Amino acid sequence: MIRQYLFFGFFLFLATDSFAALRYRTGTEILSQDSEAIDLQFQSFSKKSSFDETGAELVSTNANSFTVNDWMLKYTKGFYSDVEASFFGNFRSVSPEPQSSISSHSGLESIGLEGKYLFLINKNFKNALGLRLRKATFSNSQYTPSTAPPTDKVVLGDDGLEYGLDYLVTYYDYHLKYDFKLGYNKPSSYLSSEMLYNAAVIYYLTKISFITGIEGIYSLKNDTYTESPSLKPIISGGNSRLFNSINRQKTSLFAGAQYSFGNFIVALRGETIFKARSSDTGNTISFNIRWENNQISTNTETRRQNYFAEGFVKKISTKGSLLKINIGSEKQLSKGDHVDIFNANDYAKSYPIATGTIFEVDSEEATVRINQKFDNSPVQISSLVKVY
């Protein structure tokens, strides 16, 4: 019993420590101006079954042995208060089943750019547009269906240029975030265009976040060989339907957790693809470590225009993650409003030392949960609070 209490207490400490500055970023939560982030991600997919373009399962003597491992390095920078951009490179290793005559293959798979623009923000919603551009670093040889492809090595993936546009929405409700994405995706020229979708729920504390959701691909069915799949040129794809598909579709469920400390975030996620057409079902596990250097831009004109109330911190919780401020509903404050907190000894500073969200409101006071800290200056009694 004592050990259980000690474990629970340790978990609570990890979850509520006030110096955790970083949280799980939804699709609409971009870096602030001049902030930077570096992500290093490892992802491993293991096949369970393959399905043809009709959705029929293909029989394999060793269906679980096809694996794809990815190592991705990404650099992200915040521009202005509503724009961020990323550059990434992905290294891939593909391993067919041991009994196959096709050899494994490893190498730089692709490089790409991503960008996001944040717009239509209110206390409970954020909206963003995302742009994606990805270029394979290789070119696949194609063969007629009657010709057996060479067996010296399996391909790394689909070649060519891939691009897409995403619409992203996040809804906030106390400790929960609801994240949604609907995107258009155009893979290389010989694959059908498609729609990407994602819906997730995130439960977040100060240092720990948990996520679960569903995502998938819905084909727009404009592959050149939709009506004559047997005529489509083939590639050396190994014992898999992941590459060179015809109107691919798949749906997966995922769950994960994240822990933050200092300027770092570590995240673990598991995913299972349970439905597929012209693709594979299987399981994916991924690990990500992220470093962020958060900056608050000295250009806070947008925030200044949206401040509608000012007050002061009157009480701070033991861990420092909760604050009581001296204004409430009489100043039109409501649950979900955002606050900037300024140094108690230097109100002249044009940037906040921390941000937070109001989650309880009385007539003359409100409770604020600290979301993010940007400065070594501590939040103190009498620190200035501005609400927007």
Image (cartoon, grey):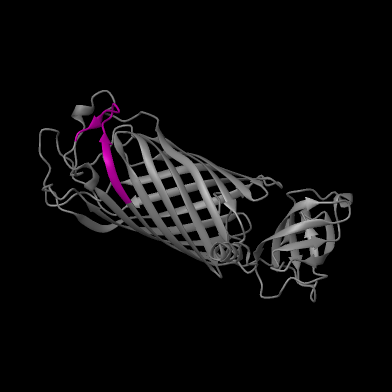
* Residue 156 percent across, percent down from the top left: 25, 51
Nearer-the-camera pick, 133 or 9: 9
Q: Is residue 56 magenta?
A: yes
376 sits left or right of 10 in the view: right
Q: Is residue 249 above or below residue 296?
A: above
Q: Quadrant of residue 62?
A: top left
Nearer-the-camera pick, 210 or 347: 210
* Residue 276 percent across, percent down from the top left: 34, 34
51 sits left or right of 201 in the view: left
Q: Quadrant of residue 107?
A: bottom left
Q: Quadrant of residue 89?
A: bottom left
Nearer-the-camera pick, 366 or 71: 366
Q: Is residue 262 magenta?
A: no
Q: How many marks?
A: 0
Nearer-the-camera pick, 107 or 117: 107
* Residue 364 percent across, percent down from the top left: 89, 55
Give the residue at the far front of this rendering. Answer: 1
Residue lying at 19% horizontally and 29% vertically, measured from the top left: 231
The kind of secondary structure the magenta stretch mainly shows is: strand
186 sits left or right of 93 in the view: right
Q: Quadrant of the C terminus?
A: bottom right
Report the span colored magenta.
45-59
* Residue 80 percent across, percent down from the top left: 62, 59
